Image: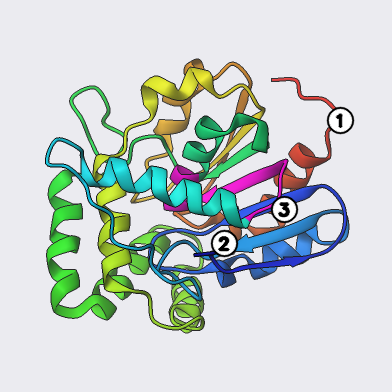
Amino acid sequence: MSLYTYTVGEGPDVVLAHGWGMHSGVWEDVVEGLVDHYRVTVLDLPGHGYSAPLPVAEVSPLEKKGAGEISRWATAALAATPAPATWIGWSLGGLVAQQVALTMPERVSRLVLVNSTPCFVQRPDWPYGQALAVLRRFAEELRQDYRAVLKRFIALEVHGSEHASAQLKQLKAMLFQHGEPAVAALQEGLAILETADLRTQWPQIQCPVLMMMGQRDQLVPSGAGEAMLPSLPNARLHVFPRAGHAPFFSHLPEFLAELRAFLDESSFLP
């Protein structure tokens, strides 16, 4: 089964992966800012947007459900996208992009993580995430009213950002533009966010990495960026002041300028 993709433009390949509960349409303005010099492919993650969920997998009791799912999602994403390419992943999409870079490093020329980390849940040695109880409450409430859960989640994405009301209106308007997400896929996505922890594998990522974080992000604290830098041999960090979880909405010109500067470099210097 192939995931939905849409490709436009000519030049070096760039792949864009969206966050949990959304779809590739969130990248519309970013695509417009890149298409003059790049061939851009947007991807709908499994069960999101126009992509069907992946077939149900048998997972042994000894295997963490989410840990198994992230590998399956990365494999499906690799099968649907060009190579080599720069991968740009927002939130959950960034976690999948990290797994792609670790699974097949020859397929990823550069990696851009937008408000994304290798570990989304707080752990004893990692305070830069969500409390486990928060994600589990989302998972429980999905079964009752997934639309309400998604709307509450995107409210968290814009919380604290400049022009939050306008951004929330924009996100709500596009939430179901590509159709209804599959509840099973939403549950799988939350399981990935709950269980995946790629921190110990980070030193294996050798390609240039750009991390872009929001200073006021309520879902992924910007301090995670500083904590992640020592683990990567070839990375840089940009924090957007007064931005929440979606700086490509709140700070589009600055976002595109930073992204283009990274993509346009013939060589990378930390």
Q: Assign the C terminus to one quadrant of the image.
A: top right
Q: Earlier in the sequence, mark 3 or mark 1?
A: 3
Considering the numbered disc 1 on the image, is that residue within a helix, a strand or a loop? loop
- Residue 222 bears which disc, if any? none
| Residue 201 visible within the image | yes
* Disc 2 packing (10 Å; few <14; some 14–19; many ≥20): many
Of tags 2 and 3, the one toward the viewer is 3
Of tags 3 and 1, the one toward the viewer is 1
Residue 140: x and y in percent read 12, 65
Q: Is residue 81 left or right of residue 26?
A: right
Q: Is residue 101 left or right of residue 185?
A: right
Considering the numbered disc 2 on the image, is that residue within a helix, a strand or a loop? helix
Residue 82, magenta (yes or no): yes
Q: Which residue is mark 3?
A: 256
Q: Report, in whole angstroms, how far the alpha carbon at label 3 lies from the one at label 1.
A: 18 Å
What amino acid is at disc 2?
A: Ser
- Residue 250 bears which disc, if any? 2
Q: Which residue is mark 1?
A: 266
Query: Residue shown at 40%/57% (left/top)?
Result: 160
Q: Is residue 91 above or below residue 108?
A: below
Q: Report, in whole angstroms, how far the alpha carbon at label 2 lies from the one at label 3.
A: 12 Å
Whether pointer 2 and pointer 3 mark residues with C-beta atoms closer than 8 Å, the reply is: no
Q: Is residue 48 above or below residue 129?
A: below
Of tags 2 and 1, the one toward the viewer is 1
Q: What residue span does the magenta drawing correspond to? A: 81-96
Residue 83 found in image quarter: top right
Whether pointer 3 and pointer 1 mark residues with C-beta atoms closer than 8 Å, the reply is: no
Q: Report, in whole angstroms, how far the alpha carbon at label 2 lies from the one at label 1.
A: 28 Å
Q: Earlier in the sequence, mark 2 or mark 3?
A: 2
What amino acid is at disc 3?
A: Leu
Query: Residue shown at 47%/38% (left/top)?
Result: 99
